[in-house]
Image (cartoon, rainbow, N blue to C red):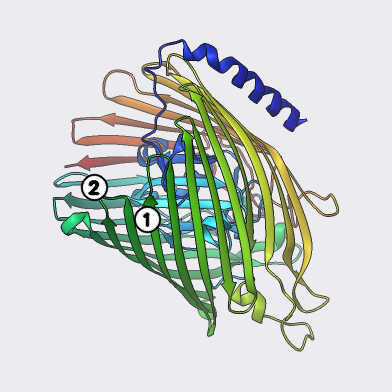
Amino acid sequence: MHKKVLAVLALSVTAYAPSYAEDDQTAPIDEQVIVYGVRLQQAETEVGSSVSILTADEIEAMGVDYALDAVAAMPGVTINQNGAFGGAATVRIRGAGSEQTLVIIDGVVSNDPTSPGGGFDFARLDPANIERIEVLKGPQSTLWGTDAIGGVVNIVTKRPDDEFQGSAFAQAGSFNSLRGGAEVSAAGDIFEYRLSATRTSTDGISRADEANGNIEDDSFESTTLGASIAARFLNEATIRLSLLWIDAESEFDSFSFGDQGNVADGDELSATEELTGNLIFNIPLLDGRFNNSLLIAYRDIDRNSFSAGAASFSSKGDRISYRYQADVAANDKNRFAFGVEHEDNKSNGEKNSIDGLFALYELQPVDTLTLTAGLRRDDHEVFGGETTARFAAAYNPNHYVTLRASWGEGFKAPTLFQTTFFCCGAIGPNAELKPETSEAADIGITLRTGDGRGEIGLSYFDQDTSNLITFSFGIGGYENIAEARSKGVELSASYDFLDWLSVSLDYANIDAEDATGAPLVRVPEHTGDVRVYINPEGNLSGNLLLRYNGEEQDPNGVVPSWTRVDLAGQYALTETVELYSRIENVFDRDYQQVIGYGTPGRSAYVGARLRF
């Protein structure tokens, strides 16, 4: 049914397109919005895959303290967190598992090499350093290799854009929460730099839901330091070094069989230290038509857990990556990119490596049509070779319409933990494990109003995933036994009703099932949000966010649907000083994201920001 509706809509718009051609064409598509996660750095209107983007200004207007809450506002994205304030936080794209979401920070693959499934924990990621977040949906292994089965969250940190500037902020609020930070940056003809620091601490709430009699608060504190320095040479060649360091401590509750979610008050603590860094050499040749980029990336994570003050668990791992990419603009209609990658992974004394070769081609036979194709070959030290392909098309018949379509493949190699862990009488790990694989297609349309004030987008997707890796007590290890299929529709719309009043809507319907027809865990069928932004003449601005999460299956039962309303506001005292505030869960709703784990009730925060 979804396919028929979308096909009819697409045909109708294509048929209607010529009438627009007679109108004024001065309301241009925003072709300055560049998508970096597709490797060829295409304009958003040229990307055939579905992509959602949040900028630093939008994140700041939302008033969130954690990047997780910003990502959650994107259509087709669902989140789960084991209690607020530092609880393990996962992101799923279009029903794919959280470990099938590849997270990239400034070109560095940042998934955790030490975790069983190799996912990324969003709990400690502070938004203050982030310039933009891109969510590229569907399998993207042709672009980024292993782990990109469900999609990619590409995070670009801030860079200097002025001779010298800086800012500082401080805030306080509920649960004895304190947060503050500062940054300075400068950009010149030859050198540029940016330094930043943020600090968060809170007494928090009980991880195990207080409604179940758990009264002990679980605190969270984190420190984030960021640094970037770059230098330019002859012919616009550049060298850039970027570092992001996070140090966090989070209290959590204990396993308690029989309690809701098998969790209850306990004296547990997790201490985590993360370092992400890269060194990039960029050498343009032939007047910029042949660009060469060499990246050396490092990702390190060190985690220690304590129970009643005594060490109980520790893990340490790192990933070192080397990537060369060449971009060739043959002429105005043809662009190429090709490259080679090598990655070394280590986790608790175990290690493996993977090599990759990729090639991408973009053809613009006419100004209104962009065709993209890609092919990649990965050679894993343990699991051998895997070939993936990708095709995408974007058609802009006029300034008011964009049609998109894409098809792609993904794969995920078993993690170091999955290939080495065994128990329950097994004599060794399962030597027959194979990579997970996926195949997906989507089609979409975006319509823009003639007055330039609004747009509406609709996408349909269908994805199949095979050889899912699942732990089995029967064999005492991991095996490939599961299959999954997810399909659905994503809708997004926005309109500027007045110069100072904007309303946006995002909705996703995801039908995600395993091979038996059972719903996939932690994938709600319906999710959506409504956002109202006001910016009247004067110094006041505000943001209202209504978020809905439908009923979803949990390993321990069913999580009921929930709705939450958040308010944020800013008031500029002067050109350099701003006051801001935020109220979360305005109507004090009781809800859970994961069975047994609590969420904050109504809470408020106030702060001040100085820019110089």
Q: Looking at the picture, does residue 544 appear above or below residue 550?
A: above
- Classify mark 2: helix, strand or loop: strand
Quarter of the image where the C terminus is located: top left
Quadrant in the picture for the N terminus: top right
Question: Does 12 sit left or right of 59 as displayed?
Answer: right
| Amino acid at circle 1 | Thr
Q: What residue type is labelled 2?
A: Ala
Question: Pointer 2: residues within 10 angstroms few (<14), some, or many (20+)?
Answer: some
Q: Name the residue under label 1.
A: 200
**Does residue 552 show up?**
no
* Label 1 Cα crowd, 10 Å radius (few <14 / some 14-19 / many 20+): many
**315 or 391, nearer to the observer:** 391
- Decide which of tag 1 and tag 2 comes sooner along the chain: 2
Q: Is mark 1 on a helix, strand or loop?
A: strand
Q: Can see residue 168?
A: yes
Q: In which quarter of the image is residue 173?
A: top left
Q: Residue at x 55, y 69 (%)?
A: 267
- Front: mark 1 or 2: 2
Q: Is residue 52 above or below residue 8?
A: below
Residue shown at 62%/41% (left/top)? 590
Q: Label 1, label 2: how many angstroms apart (C-alpha)? A: 14 Å
Q: Are marks 1 and 2 in contact (CB under 8 Å)?
A: no
> Residue 237, percent across and down?
23, 58
Question: Which residue is labeled 2 in the image?
Answer: 168
Q: Which residue lies furthest to the bottom in this view?
A: 427
In percent of width and height, residue 148 lies at: 58, 57
As drawn, is 393 to the left or to the right of 297?
right
Q: Nearer the viewer, residue 474 or 207?
A: 474
User: What is the total number of numbered labels drawn onto the structure image?
Assistant: 2
Judge from the rendering whether residue 84 lies leftward or rightward of residue 285; answer left or right. Answer: right
Q: Which of 215 and 463 is in front in this view?
A: 463
Location of residue 576 in the rendering, given as x and y in whole percent from the top left corner = 18, 36
